Image: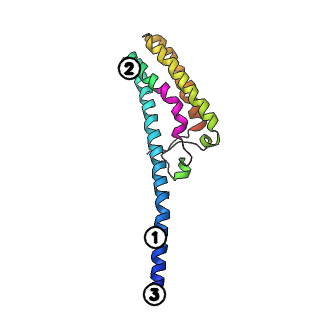
């Protein structure tokens, strides 16, 4: 009889341990999905920067294409703070693939301001691209990275280790 009770207790304990671990796994998976989604979006922003640079250097692509990319970036800017839910820092997840600094969660209002600035600057550059003047676009693009992307990156992004 004692063996059955011990077995029942051990089985019950095992079930409780598995049951309590499942939500944590789901949360961790959800947090990793959030990290992966924001990294994909940021790579899209980087692709627009690269396309702009290639257009200016070698004439590949068009200002019309760049304008559309910049408009998408401007419209996505207000979503950026939502891409950083609590629990998705590198430290929280024990990963080294994210450059998101803890400052993001300590200063969410600062991130919101930086994202709004990014949206504003992206919209302004899109308007310049819409005019079709490569020289004017090139002059404005020179400061765009520092003034638009840099407002977030300087304060909220750490350098990621190379793979």
Label 2, label 1: how far apart the Cα atoms are: 56 Å
Marks 1 and 3 close (CB-CB < 8 Å): no
Magenta segment boundaries in residue numbering: 73-85
64 in the magenta segment: no
Q: Badge 2 is on which residue?
A: 65
Residue 15 rendering spot, x and y as whole percentages: 46, 70
- The earlier-in-sequence mark between 2 and 1 is 1
Q: Badge 1 is on which residue?
A: 15
Residue at horizontal 46 percent and vertical 72 percent from the top: 14
> Helix, strand, or loop for circle 1?
helix
Direction from residue 21 to residue 60 in the image, left or right: left
Which quarter of the figure has residue 54? top left
78 in the magenta segment: yes
> Helix, strand, or loop for circle 3?
helix
Label 1, label 3: how far apart the Cα atoms are: 18 Å
Badge 3: few (under 14), some or many (20 or more) residues near its Cα, within 10 Å? few
| Relative to 115, residue 100 above or below | below
Dominant SS of magenta comes to helix
> Helix, strand, or loop for circle 2?
helix
Disc nearest the viewer among 2 and 3 = 3
- The earlier-in-sequence mark between 2 and 3 is 3
Q: Badge 3 is on which residue?
A: 3
Residue 138 rendering spot, x and y as whole percentages: 47, 15
Quarter holding the C terminus is top left
Label 2, label 3: how far apart the Cα atoms are: 73 Å
Residue at horizontal 45 percent and vertical 81 percent from the top: 7
| Relative to 33, residue 45 above or below | above
Q: Is residue 120 visible?
A: yes
Residue 137 rendering spot, x and y as whole percentages: 47, 14
Residue 123 shows which numbered tag?
none
Q: Residue furthest left?
A: 60
């Amino acid at each position: 009889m004692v063996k059955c009770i011990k077995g029942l207790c051990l089985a019950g304990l095992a079930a409780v341990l598995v049951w309590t671990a499942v939500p944590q796994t789901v949360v961790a998976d959800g947090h990793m999905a959030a990290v992966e989604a924001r990294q994909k979006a940021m790579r899209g922003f980087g692709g627009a920067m690269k396309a702009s640079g290639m257009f200016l250097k070698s004439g590949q692509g068009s200002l019309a294409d760049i304008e559309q990319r910049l408009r998408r970036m401007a419209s996505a800017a207000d979503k950026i703070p939502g891409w950083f839910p609590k629990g998705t820092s590198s430290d929280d997840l024990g990963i080294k693939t994210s450059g998101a600094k803890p400052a993001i969660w300590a200063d969410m209002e600062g991130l919101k301001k930086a994202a709004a600035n990014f949206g504003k600057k992206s919209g302004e550059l899109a308007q310049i691209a819409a005019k079709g003047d490569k020289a004017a676009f090139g002059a404005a693009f020179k400061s765009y990275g520092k003034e638009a992307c840099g407002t977030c990156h300087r304060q909220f992004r750490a350098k990621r280790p190379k793979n």
